[in-house]
Image (tube, rainbow, N blue to C red):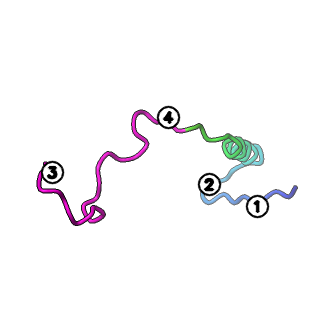
Amino acid sequence: MSTPDIRVEKGHAGPEEVAAITAILLARAAVQPAAPAHRGRARAGWRRLEREPGFRAPHSWR
């Protein structure tokens, strides 16, 4: 496995500091994302008017 080059943009980082930040970034990248917690509806409860059909019944309350 080859290691990518890491460049410090500002300041001076020692080898220990670069190794520490690399370990943190690799650990964060390896974490599986948690399943989203849906409460209630999975979709929006409103509709876009331009996607509605053109005809509405005369007794419709909208």
Amino acid marked by disc 2: Gly
The span picked out in magenta is 36-62
Report how far apart the C-alphas of labels 2 and 1 lie in the structure.
17 Å
On the image, the x and y values in percent for residue 10 come to 60, 57
Q: Amino acid at mark 3?
A: Ser
Decide which of tag 4 and tag 2 comes sooner along the chain. 2
Camera-near label (1 vs 4) is 4
For disc 4, the neighbor class at 10 Å (few under 14, some 14 to 19, many from 20) is few
According to the picture, the residue beneath numbered tag 1 turns out to be: 5
Residue behind mark 2:
11
Mark found first going from the N terminus, 2 or 1: 1
Q: Nearer the viewer, mark 3 or mark 4?
A: 3
Give the Cα separation between the discs numbered 4 and 2: 41 Å
Inter-mark Cα distance, 3 to 4: 35 Å
The residues bearing labels 1 and 3 have C-alpha atoms spaced at a distance of: 65 Å
Question: Residue 13, image x and y in percent?
Answer: 69, 50
Q: Earlier in the sequence, mark 1 or mark 3?
A: 1
Q: CA distance from mark 1 to mark 4?
A: 37 Å
Which structural element holds mark 3?
loop
Q: Which residue is mark 3?
A: 60
Residue at the spot of label 4: 37
Mark 3 neighbour density, 10 Å: few (under 14) some (14–19) many (20 or more): few
Q: Earlier in the sequence, mark 3 or mark 4?
A: 4
